Image (cartoon, rainbow, N blue to C red):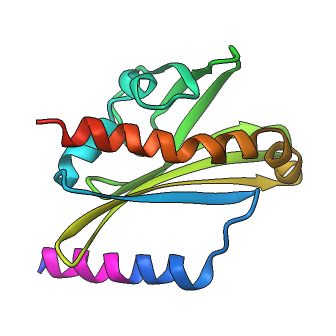
Amino acid sequence: MHTLFITLFTMLTLHTYAQEKKITKKHFWHTVETSAPADKIWEIWTDVPQWKTWDTGLKEASMDEPFGLHAKGRILSLEDRKSTFKIVSFEPGVSYTFKTKLPLGGLYVKRFLVIKNGRNYFTHEVWFSGLSGGIFANIFGKKFKNILPEVMDNVKKIAEKP
């Protein structure tokens, strides 16, 4: 029953993204198919200190508590910008979203896994919200969007390594 639910959820999620969402400078994502098992992707995504090994925009990442809903962490960009983040949604083994506060807004990152036709797909989604969302999208969005395919390919390479 659990597998059926995940399969249905996956099909609906991919259909929703294909039909209803449009990539903009304030909201974008990248999806990659992988031969790696979903739990390997999940392991990579939730190992916060190792984010720097695949996220080419990060110098450091840390978390002082177990990865889960409401857990907080810190990131340091290559430009030495320090930020804190908080896990605001969490479905173990399937998805999580973290939020970084911005003045009058926020930056959200959602990572989720889906299975379709027996294949694993993983998606990294980014959006800017609030009154300042457009401003921060103009400042950071293009860079984030441009490195996203490389970041996702890095995750895939690590996950598929024998």
Membership of 42 in magenta stretch = no
Q: Which residues are magenta?
A: 2-11
| Residue 66 image point, x, y percent | 33, 30
Residue, x 39% and y 21% (percent of image)? Answer: 49
Q: Quadrant of the C terminus?
A: top left
Q: Please state if 19 lies on the left or on the right of 3 as rendered.
A: right
| Residue 98 image point, x, y percent | 53, 45
Q: Please state if 58 lies on the left or on the right of 154 as rendered.
A: right
Tell me which corner region of the image, top left, top right, bottom left or bottom right, holds residue 62.
top left
- Judge by depth and name the residue closer to the eye, 161 or 124: 161
Magenta region, mostly helix, strand or loop? helix
| Residue 117 image point, x, y percent | 21, 79
Residue, x 21% and y 54% (percent of image)? Answer: 38
Q: Please state if 106 lies on the left or on the right of 46 as rendered.
A: right
Q: Please state if 141 lies on the left or on the right of 147 as rendered.
A: right
Task: Please tell me whether residue 123 is drawn above or below residue 80 in the rendered image.
Answer: below
Tell me which corner region of the image, top left, top right, bottom left or bottom right, holds residue 99.
top right
Task: Please tell me whether residue 147 is drawn above or below residue 130 in the rendered image.
Answer: above
Residue at the limit of the structure toward the top, as seen here: 80
Q: Quadrant of the N terminus?
A: bottom left
Residue, x 51% and y 57% (percent of image)? Answer: 30
- Judge by depth and name the residue closer to the eye, 114 or 54: 54
Task: Please tell me whether residue 131 is drawn above or below residue 76 in the rendered image.
Answer: below
Tell me which corner region of the image, top left, top right, bottom left or bottom right, holds residue 77.
top right
| Residue 153 image point, x, y percent | 40, 43
Confirm whether residue 98 shows in the render. no
Confirm whether residue 106 shows in the render. yes
Total numbered labels placed on residues in the image: 0
Residue, x 67% and y 73% (percent of image)? Answer: 22
